[in-house]
Amino acid sequence: MAKVFFKSHNKEVECEVGEKLLDVARKADIFIDAPCNGNQSCGKCKVKLLEGKCDSEKTVHISDEEWEQGYILACATKVTEDMVIEVPSKLSSSMHGMKIEGSDNKVDQKLYKRGRQFLDDNGLNYNTNLVKKYIELDKPSLDDNISDVDRIERYARQQLGVDSIDFRLDILRKIPQILREEDFKVTLTYVKKKNKITILNIEPGNNEKELYGLAIDIGTTSVVVCLVDLLTNEVLERASSGNAQIRYGADVINRIVFAVKKDNIKLMQKAVIDETINPLIQSIYDKTGISKDNVIRVVLSGNTTMSTLFLGIYPDYLRLEPFIPPYLKCPNIMGENVGLNVNDSALVYLSPNVASYVGGDITAGVLSSGIWTSEENTLFIDLGTNGEIVFGNKDFMMCCACSAGPAFEGGGISCGMRASAGAVEKVNIDKETLEPKLTVIGDCEPIGICGSGIIDLICQMLLTKIIDRRGKIQKELNNKRIRFNEHGIGEYVLAFKDDYENLENDLLINEVDIDSFIRAKGAIYSGASVLIESLGMDFDVIDKVYIAGGIGNNLNIENSILIGLLPDVDRNKFQYIGNSSLVGSYLTLISTDAKHKLEEIASQMTYVELSVYPSYMDEFVSSCFLPHTNIDQFPTVKSLLEEN
């Protein structure tokens, strides 16, 4: 046995000799960013050995200078004796995204209103089968000495017009005392189906004004929770953070691989529920003062892998041909079945999946986008880790998924982070001096760069000829912001650490980052191209392009087209629709009609498996260029580059 002391966390961990340092940290709940799940391909799990010796391999991700200073990769290091480790705070760029954040809801409210308008225009009601009702029961006496439950059931038959009631054991345990607290005057929360009610909650006195639900988007990188007043349909509060599963890999494939080893499924479920969703819910309770017993309904939307891991289901067959999901439509579950921080009897619903790589986040997104009711040909692109795409209208909907990776949310990039305070979201580079002008979220010092900022940066580097169309930095440029390491890998510095108090290291992007992002954008463009091609069409038939996902309202459409992420079509056709998965969850939460429409959408979508589509790989390779090897597909970009 050996002991590892993590000085940065003031935590000592006992482990087996020969155990990987990354695994030791994970078991101790010490966050070390490892998007590649420890296969040594990303180099982000860099830590510093302060004392002791270890069995470590030097990789291209560690410079000679860093190696001399004691830096090692946690995933490439085995513990051989007692040691002291420092986890640099820069490794918290992803951890920074784990922090719980609220929002002012101004942008969100417009999206909720837009979604409700689709329901209104199509005659879908906001009614649900949830009821909250204050009742006054006859007090028991020697002449009327029926049981407490029979007393409630008698009232239900006589006053509510139902034949029977149903309830869980935890409700029965509450009934005797609650009835007598307020002299047999209580408030029932129940679901009514035909001539039967199922009691979900019982409270003393009159409390008809408190009935809440939660709409939740379980993203691969980020999770968002919204509290909704089910009596008014108003969104009261919102909280978001990074998905704690990110410590086990940045993308769904790495997480599946980790989950099926050593029965790690419970760890993955714990990460998303106990370490991510429940703390977000609790932060909302703390802010609003509401009781969890009044949260009676929950709707969650996530990709198929996220939903599968949320339920604790073995996920491996999702990634193995023929790519079979364990379920498409989730069975009815309650809050206590998955340990959610809500009423134990709360009804929990997961949006239906379409296929292994098109999940409930996309069906919810399509619901909120209104594609299902439009005559226009609409291209829907969710710029998340999975990169799901839908094309269609009210008559048909085709969909696919392409492995874009976490780059659009800042993952897998040296200085990448979620779109939160301190993230560079816009970049402009002076053509003569190559000096950057940065716009930072929160108007504070930069600590990283998010997806929209990376798009701007790569576009600006292309226009100012810092990089060529392959994404390679020009070696002949003589500028302090451009440098090359001992491996010949070029980098561009956005911010020098000496210019800012909070920067431990220079904020930069290197050729490895650029290559990763080019592959991510290539996956999106090629996926959209092949999806439309599968119908014998091309981009000319598009009437609208909806952009969804966590990349933010600050996505620059022009720059996105210039680097070849989006098709070169009329800019007026583009519209950002925000977190469409969350809005779809909200609509499903407040309307049974919307829930039925959601399930109808899922059943009508046709999935195209890109991995077996003949022309996909050729198109993907062609798309891994700025903007594309066939620049004639981007006529406006071609003319702009010729001018420069």
Image (cartoon, helix red, strand yellow):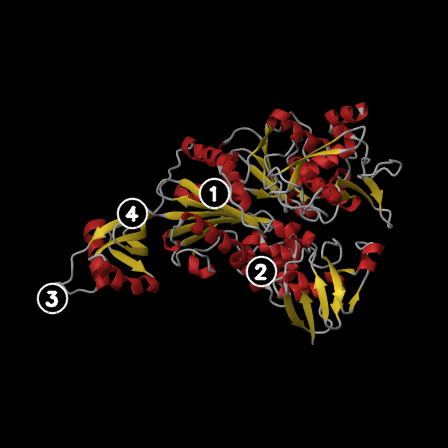
- Residue furthest bottom as drawn: 1
Nearest the viewer among 115 and 459 is 459
Q: Earlier in the sequence, mark 1 or mark 4?
A: 4
Check disc 3 and give the amino acid type. Answer: Leu
Quarter containing the N terminus: bottom right
Residue located 67% across and 40% down the image: 524
Q: Is residue 245 above or below residue 456?
A: below
Give residue 228's position: percent from left, percent from top.
Answer: 42, 44
Q: Earlier in the sequence, mark 3 or mark 2?
A: 3
Report if residue 627 is visible in the image.
Answer: no
Q: Is residue 183 left or right of residue 483?
A: left
Give the mark toward the camera: 1 or 4.
Answer: 4
Q: Secondary structure at mark 2?
A: helix
Which residue does the numbered mark 4 point to in the structure image? 208
Mark 1 and mark 4 residues within 8 Å of each other at the beta carbon:
no
Check disc 1 and give the amino acid type. Answer: Leu
Q: Earlier in the sequence, mark 4 or mark 3?
A: 3
Which residue does the numbered mark 1 point to in the structure image? 598
Check disc 2 and give the amino acid type. Answer: Met
Residue 268: image tag: 2
Q: Secondary structure at mark 4?
A: loop
